[in-house]
Amino acid sequence: MAVLKTLNLNKTFKIRSLKIFAVEDFNIEIDTSDFFALVGESGSGKSTVAKLLMRLSKPDSGRILFKDNDIWQMNKNDLINFKQSIGLVFQDSYASLNPRMKIMDIVQEPLKIHKKFSVNEIKFRTIEILKNIGIDEIMLERYPHQLSGGQRQRVAIARALILEPEILIADEPLSALDISLQASILNQLIGIKKNREMGILLITHDLNIVRAVSNRLAVMHLGRIVEKGQTKDIFREPLHPYTKILLNSIPGFHRRDRKKIPKISTEDKSSWNLKGCRFFNRCDYKMDICRDNIPELKTIEGRKVRCFLY
Ligand code: SF4
Ligand code: MG
């Protein structure tokens, strides 16, 4: 049983009189063993997914199940349990750190609110998680403005982890930081994950990170998942034309069948309104059927692909 699972999620926004699907027919399932990456260009709907999964936004249709329990039909106790079981980190979550609170207090606040631990236990756990994410004890008495951007993001991650969530949702958590800092924080996160039953959903546009850390992957394009499967399978042989372009855009990443593949570009806004496949305007393989028909996600070679080629 997946800890967190979505069933045919749909979420639309209205822009003038146009109804735009930000997230359409969206299905993923995340377990505590997963390091699941959700990838796509900016504006592909990734952050909308994070908000839906966190119950910060309500889907128009479809369901989100936490341990088989619909998060919009939970009783109060189950809802509290759900919220404690999902940790959340945003790209700029350090902006949400209370500037008047010391690091120690910021990180331990969720424990004080939700758990009846002794003062010593709370302190022990706080120091432990901060240490694991790379914050020295010397920082405990400091305030957010006395920390670097990387340190503040570590503190935000520690706060998200302090209640020992079963799933950590991280929406572009490191993209404001330089590469060596990103690698260091990710390694620490992997270390923490090893010692707990904790699934991670990493929402990102950085494919090098995806390849390095995730075991499962969903590629999102204009609101739809176009390919989903084991990360190593997809990197070995991407099947969807969009995934091929994405992977070939990684500097230094060469596949044998690399051809002249167009540069990745920001999606033409009008593609949201296409009746059929939304990749139609950019696709080298398009066929007549793609213009007016929406491809379904089909199981191909042990993964899911949304394309009429298959
Ligand atoms: Fe290209 Fe058609 Fe596949 Fe869309 S469905 S990616 S247009 S081949
Ligand atoms: Mg985003």
Image (tube, rainbow, N blue to C red):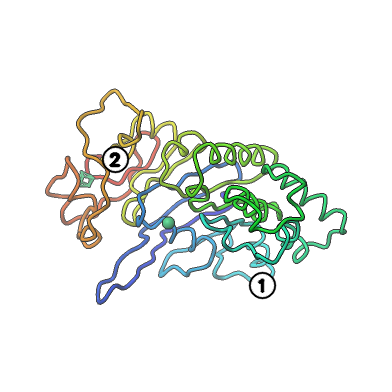
Q: Nearer the viewer, residue 67 or 187?
A: 187
Mark 1 surroundings within 10 Å by alpha-carbon count, few (fewer than 14), some (14 through 19), many (20 or more) = few
Residue 90 picture location, percent across and down: 53, 56
Quadrant assignment, res 108: bottom right
Q: Residue at x 35, y 41 (%)?
A: 299
**The CB of the residue at mark 1 lies under 8 Å from ligand 2:** no
Residue 29 picture location, percent across and down: 50, 50
Quadrant assignment, res 252: top left
What amino acid type should be assigned to the residue bearing mark 2?
Answer: His
**286 left or right, relative to 186:** left
Q: Quadrant of ligand 1?
A: top left
Q: Residue at x 41, y 68 (%)?
A: 61
Q: Number of marks in the image?
A: 2
Q: Is residue 252 above or below residue 122?
A: above
Give the quarter of the figure containing the C terminus.
top left
What amino acid type should be assigned to the residue bearing mark 1?
Answer: Lys
In the current view of this chain or complex, which residue is farthest to the bottom? 17
In the current view of this chain or complex, which residue is farthest to the top? 256
| Disc number lying in front (2 or 1) | 2
Distance CA(mark 2)–CA(mark 1):
42 Å
In the rendered structure, find residue 240 and report the number of the disc placed on it.
2
Q: Residue at x 62, y 55 (%)?
A: 156
The reply to whether dot 2 and dot 1 touch (C-beta < 8 Å) is: no
Q: Earlier in the sequence, mark 2 or mark 1?
A: 1
Q: Is residue 13 above or below residue 45?
A: below
Residue occupied by mark 1:
76
Q: Residue at x 21, y 39 (%)?
A: 262
**The CB of the residue at mark 2 lies under 8 Å from ligand 1:** yes
Residue 272 picture location, percent across and down: 25, 60
Residue 6 picture location, percent across and down: 48, 57
Q: Nearer the viewer, residue 194 or 302?
A: 194
